[in-house]
Image (cartoon, coloured by chain):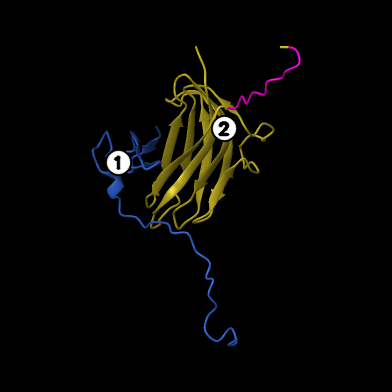
Amino acid sequence: MPKESCPFCGEMTEMLLVNGVFKSTKCTHCKKDLSKLNVPLLVEEKPDLKAPEDVLDEL
Amino acid sequence: MTGSMAWTFPGGRFEQSVTSVTLVNATGKIVDTVVPAGKLWILVSIKAKNSDDVARVITLYIYKEAAKTNLLRVLQNASVNASALLHYPAGAGVDAEEQTNPYPILAAGNAISVQWTTGGASTGGTAADGLVIEYLEVSVSA
């Protein structure tokens, strides 16, 4: 079971296994809920597979 | 057993440990994973992602114990650009070991500690697969 550092108190706290992924949960030291941290979710860039208008001639 | 040969795969059970990692503005991050009692791991790979929008130095440490008193190895150490990845095994960075044995054996109680240094002012970010550790797990008796 991994542990992560808590950004509020700096202590190492347990993580929770949810659907095969270890995720943040409530800090066992300061009791802040790390799963509620408001930071952007990194989204993988997907390739744009459709050509823009006017790039391709009509077939 | 004359005339027969048994093939044995000694590598144990293959595991892929996925951890969601949240990096916060101007704050370092550590995720520690400890080899359980009665187990032995053959480390196959580590992937660590910088989910922030500034560069961060990511370092992969192996400690002898969960309390991280005795440092055994520094597997990898590099500055990783925003949204980029650090892989192990790969070319070793500064102060990391040469990877003549890229698949180290980890004993029960050993800790894999992955550290993201603070990158200064940023928006932070969460990567659902921010840390992936692949290993072969073998049960051992005392």
Residue that carries the numbered disc 2 in the rendered image: B43
Task: Give coordinates of residue A4: x percent, y percent.
Answer: 38, 38
Which chain is rendered yellow in the image?
Answer: B
For the magenta stretch, what is the residue range?
B2-11
Residue at image coords 45%, 51%:
B119
User: What kind of secondary structure does the magenta stretch mostly adopt?
Assistant: loop
Compared with residue B10, is residue B122 higher up or lower down, i.e. above or below? below
Quadrant containing the N terminus of chain B is top right
Name the amino acid, label 1. Answer: Thr
Residue at image coords 50%, 23%:
B64
Which chain is rendered blue in the image?
Answer: A
Residue that carries the numbered disc 1 in the rendered image: A25
Task: Give coordinates of residue A45: x percent, y percent.
Answer: 49, 63
Give the Cα separation between the discs numbered 1 and 2: 27 Å
Parent chain of label 2: B
Parent chain of label 1: A
